[in-house]
């Protein structure tokens, strides 16, 4: 978790006076939804800094929100409270939850949006949000972001303990992560799981996956076939490629991604989310 | 006004050290407009927190900005200064104003953008911005957001009184709010006034309007006709509906809205802003 | 540089406790890129306020980012650190730089993105970012915004001196600014360099350029021809024009711009970036 700290920087203390709340939603930005959540938070704890991760998650795309949160959360200081509101089931029987894991807190619907940030940790604590004392007085049936999650997050930054918010949960909704499939000793099928703003196509093959396949180091020679494209080496940066060449490299998320130097891999090679590729160690 | 506070939370004091300025504009986010306003504000009062409500109001749509501000402002702590810059008449004879109402302040053009937040309060004070001391040295004819409204807002957070900004105004521009029309004792015509990011269609029928029509409680049985859709009950949440069913419920703004559970009422039923519907109590 | 301060306001001290970091990128807002930069910054210096100028610069458009930064930066308090990440060459041989100029700091790739903010000042200091102590422990080959520029900016707000970041540079990449071309004593060819959100078309003709041509004051009578439009005077505000009339005025950036009162000059007159016009003093 502390991987990102610079050499100079000590890890910030949990409970330091200024606390950060992040927001990840599918609300868009042409309305009052995110703004009213921020108003509630800074009304309850004026010492909080609210930082947008994104309000432009595709509507109701819980899996995408979960992946984006995974890529962002660990860069925030410990003690940060991450609120995620991609919530197609608002008003239904789905639970509302708060969780603590690795010195980060998470608040939102129990629909899998925290699958990838909670999934890997033994010391995870999750509670069901039931104590009305920490919600707005009137809780609407349609906007829990403002009426439940924002005030709960603000109270967490004030030092309210998870146990005050409601009873502990033994289980919660998890989405299954996409995983590469082994075809043979030195061959696997990977999947494109996210296409970024620049058309880079991020796969589900981690550095560890490739290391296991090759028996250690990143392999020198590979054969990767994806639609009409073939890639024969793992590059280090986008700049390794000549114009229009399809590249494969480990991106900033730690997963193998397809890219074109100063170009758009997605458009040029017509890759799509969910698409498969075959990777062979030579 | 204090309706939103949680049980635990006391209302924040006006004049508490950290003050919030909100921004609501039609500037978009691909330019320097909102950023330079924020620079001016935090240059004048580094203790201010600037929070975006929206920069994606449709260009020159003063009425929409007024509605969005109405839905957001009361969730911010008292003492907040709300700046709205949807200003097709910048540089014309239109006045610039600041107003105080219910422990919130408002700064912007006198073009109706504060119609719905100022309209309901007896103790409203409004002044015409004329004192150049609280504006930037050079006031352009084309960007009052940066040169007039941002510095005035920042000075308000520093404790400058409204009366120092300019002379009081007895009247200011108000837009007429859309209102339902009574057809008979137990029947009315309502209007769609806002279609939100998820396709939910918010009407001008408030909980009070419906209570008056039905003689108190939310009625059990209704008949609502809108284009090809018919609704026969008032739901509590989006989750009340079966797949593709048109629902009618009181949304988080307190107005009756049309929705489809996990769907898009606007697209499915081709509703549009300004469109009418007939609601009958059975 | 201090032009914007109000009469009441003294210039803020450099090194005052609260420091501002601005972000200007082409990352878009539907992902974790800007959010993770903010997390890194507030993790290293929780006392920093991070303000977005824009994340919607057209992809890889370094010149546009440079122009937007030029229009925004001087409105921020002295001591602000401006980070710009429009970086098509990430991972290539291009240098990473930090610069100080006029009591503002700048951090980003050495690709010309600071051309217009550094170009005018004799006292500019620029260093090449080489000291790994001020970067994240693992520097990816694809996301220097998060791994290099964000942590360097945060350390600058903590008082780290430029000289600690790396060796000084004598030269750095500069884009050539668009400039009007003289046709004769009282005639020039100008160029549209930026079309704003409202369709106003900003040119490369400054107030000074026009003053030099006319021998002092803004001229009373001119003849400006641009595509099918003709303009015969310099207006003061958008409100000077009748409906649909093409106007020419000095906008808030200090450059001559084409506009239509409550309309869209770009759409109505089909102007485009790079397009020329002829301006004659009568």
Image: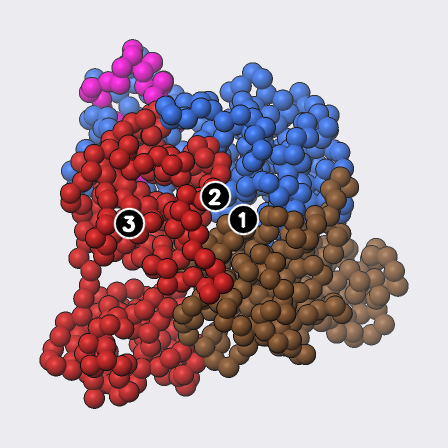
Chain colours: A brown, B red, C blue
Dividing the picture into quarters, in which one does residue C2 lie? top left
**Label 2: which residue?**
B18
Near-viewer residue (B88 or B113): B113
Dividing the picture into quarters, in which one does residue A125 lie? bottom right
Observer able to see residue C74 = yes
Q: Chain of mark 1?
A: A
Residue B101 disc label: 3
Q: Residue at x 23, y 54 (%)?
A: B121
CA gap between label 1 and label 3 equals 25 Å
C219 sits left or right of A196 in the view: left
Labels 3 and 2: the sequence-earlier one: 2
Q: Residue at x 48, y 59 (%)?
A: B9
Q: Secondary structure at mark 2?
A: loop
Judge whether residue C215 is colored magenta. yes
Q: Residue at x 27, y 81 (%)?
A: B217
Q: Residue at x 53, y 64 (%)?
A: A152
**Crowdedness of circle 3 by 10 Å Cα count: few (<14), some, many (20+)?**
some
Residue C198 x, y percent position in the rendering = 32, 43
**Label 1: which residue?**
A47
Residue A77 disc label: none
| In the rendered image, the vertical position of residue B57 relative to residue C1, given as above or below | below
Residue A163 x, y percent position in the rendering = 63, 70
Q: Chain of mark 3?
A: B
Question: Where does the magenta region start and end?
Answer: C200-229
Observer able to see residue A75 = no
Say if mark 1 contacts mark 2, CB within 8 Å: yes
């Amino acid at each position: 978790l502390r991987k990102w700290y610079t050499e100079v920087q000590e890890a910030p203390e949990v409970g330091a006076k200024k606390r950060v709340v992040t927001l990840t939603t599918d609300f868009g930005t042409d309305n009052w939804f995110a703004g009213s959540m921020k108003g509630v938070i800074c009304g309850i704890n004026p010492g909080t800094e609210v930082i947008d991760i994104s309000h432009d998650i595709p509507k109701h795309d819980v899996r995408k929100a979960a992946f984006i949160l995974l890529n962002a959360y660990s860069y925030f200081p410990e003690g940060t409270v991450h609120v995620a509101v991609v919530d197609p089931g608002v008003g239904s029987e789905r639970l509302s939850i708060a969780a603590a894991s690795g010195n980060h807190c998470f608040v939102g619907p129990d629909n899998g949006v925290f699958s990838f940030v909670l999934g890997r940790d033994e010391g995870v604590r999750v509670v069901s949000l039931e104590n009305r004392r920490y919600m707005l007085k009137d809780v609407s049936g349609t906007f829990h972001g403002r009426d439940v999650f924002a005030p709960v997050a603000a109270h967490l930054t004030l030092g309210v303990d998870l146990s005050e918010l409601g009873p502990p949960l033994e289980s919660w909704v998890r989405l299954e992560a996409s995983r590469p499939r082994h075809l043979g000793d030195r061959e696997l099928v990977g999947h494109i799981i996210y296409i970024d703003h620049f058309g880079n196509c991020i796969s589900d093959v981690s550095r560890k996956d490739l290391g296991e396949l090759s028996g250690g180091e990143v392999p020198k020679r590979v054969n990767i076939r994806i639609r009409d494209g073939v890639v024969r080496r793992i590059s280090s940066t986008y700049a390794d490629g000549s114009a229009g060449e399809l590249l494969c490299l480990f991106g900033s998320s730690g997963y193998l991604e397809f890219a074109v130097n100063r170009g758009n891999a997605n458009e040029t090679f017509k890759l799509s989310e969910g698409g498969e590729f075959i990777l062979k160690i030579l």
